[in-house]
Amino acid sequence: MLRLWQLRRRIANVNATESFDPERHLTAVAESLGLPVPDDARAGAVHYLRLAHDMARLLSTAPLADDGFEQASAFVPGRRAPSEP
Amino acid sequence: VSLLGPEIPAWRIADAVRRGEVGAVEVVEATLDRIAAGNPRINAFTDVTAARARAEAAAIDARRRAGEPLGPLAGVPYAVKNLYDVAGLATRAGSKINRGQPAAAEDAALVQRLRAAGAVLVGALNMGEYAYDFTGENIHDGDCLNPHDVRRIAGGSSSGSAAAVAAGLVPLTLGSDTNGSIRVPASFCGVFGLKPTYGRLSRRGTFPFCDSLDHLGPLARSARDLALAFDALQGFDGRDPAQADVPPLASLRELGKGIDGLRIAVLGGHFGQGGTAAAHGAVARIARALGAEAEAVLEDAALARAAAYIITSAEAAAFHLERLRTRAGDFDPYARERLLAGATLPAAWLVRAQRVRRFAHDRALALFDEHDLLLAPATPCSAPMLGQRTMTLDGRVVEMRPHLGVFSQPISCLGLPVCAVPAVAAGELPIGVQLIAAPWREDLCLRAAWMLEQAGVAVARLPGGSVGTPANR
């Protein structure tokens, strides 16, 4: 099983030039979204954002082909959602 | 043995009601008494629909007296996670915010199906807020406690669904599973749980968590009850955009085939390490009973888990964005932190995660060229203590909450059907094992689960150790 510390080691060299500051990212994007971040939630949100960044960097290692699909979640024309008439 | 006792499985109740050995009203009254007596200890129910249950049961007894045919679940009491719409109740989905919403006008699709099969709804069940939870802790309704040790968590987010069944309050419940929310509490509470193939069952009338990954399914103390319920729950609804229009399985009648002809392997790699000795020991016991000697590796398990993490964070946060803007103080603090982080994820991460999900799924299908069933731990440990925040795995202290789904999350990301079965070890807390099949082959999971139950290797024991008599199992 890939533990978090192993995951971090595995992706350490991926996009090595990318810098990601979860605090700055959270502040900037939340402000753009008009999303207040309560003081008592900030540290936790930063923690989970850092974890998400680790996961995203791992995903960047998958050897995807350009002709693969699933750019969007499944969308089937002709089917209605429950709330639509 | 009384037909009104807590150990009686759903299939036996339905059989007795159809034969007139016991009335549906008698069954429901005994069930309501048991809930009144037993629920305060574990806090599994948030609503008890006593008047509705009595009316549904009386209608079944009237039909039997009139000589009309009764459904396969005639008179079986059941309850649903409180994210299912129940006509007349607000669909709280474990939250404070939703309970201010108007009551549901009609039942969820799966509640309608169980009612049509003759089952009797007795209430709605506790859960982690908005299903973003593996613990069953809930600051709004109170924590749902593990019936086997009330100092421990029931697991989530379908906490009440597992605890109510484990305690013998009802024989059957419905839950939901996005990253493990049926399998994790089933493991901790020692019951059977089925997460069907993604797209198998209609989700109409349930409050979403993450549309791309949300599944619904049953929990019970018997694999036979899972099959009985699963057969009744199937059917194309046309109102859930993710539901596939596939032929229904008649899984109940397949149970007798057991594991004849099935090629069964144990998943190594990601799933073969990183849990406690109890978790891996449980897999070894189940593998021995199934004669599984081969090992298989799901190469992209870590990728699938990462994809599930990103998809869940981003979709759930986008769905709750307005509530986060206007009602942030009314969220559970743990859910709120993750949702706030998820709201800021770049779109490129989400699209990448969807593509990796497809990539990992397509590669995983090759495993089923050589194997029919794959075995893996359901959780890395048995039920942790309430309020616990860290745990030690492989000699390292890790955060508890994100790790509880480490073995369940990759499987639901790929949409594969899984039955979680309770592995029995004398004197130990329950712990579950996943029986995983190719898409649309829930019947294989259930066949193996039933075989293990009959062999006494996977058994849902009531608190205190009783597992019921063989006749009742």
Image (tube, coloured by chain):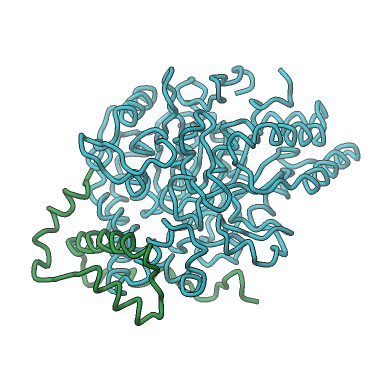
Query: Viewed as shown, does residue A24 lie left or right of B34?
Result: left
Viewer can see residue A72: yes
- Identify the chain drawn in cyan: B
Relative to A14, does residue B38 appear above or below in the rendering? above
Against B315, residue B392 (above or below) is: above
Q: Residue at x 49, y 46 (%)?
A: B137
- Asked whether residue B368 is in view, the answer is no
Work out whether B296 lies above or below A5: above
Dividing the image into 4 quarters, which one contains the C terminus of chain A?
Answer: bottom right
Q: Which residue appears farthest toward the right when viewing the image?
A: B66
Q: Residue furthest front?
A: A39
Q: Is residue B472 left or right of residue B386?
A: right
- The quadrant where residue A82 appears: bottom right
Q: Give the image quarter of residue B282.
A: top left
Q: Position of residue B166 (x, y in %)?
A: 56, 32
> Which residue does the image show at 34% across and 33% down from the upper left?
B264
Indicate left or right for B337 with A13 as reference.
right
Letter of the chain in green: A
Quadrant where the N terminus of chain A is found in the figure: top left
Foreground of the two, B33 or B431: B33
Q: Is residue B373 left or right of residue B228?
A: left
Q: Position of residue B22 (x, y in %)?
A: 81, 28
Residue A63 in the image: x percent, y percent? 18, 62
Picture mark count: 0
The foreground one among B54 and B61 is: B54
Percent x, y of residue B427: 43, 18
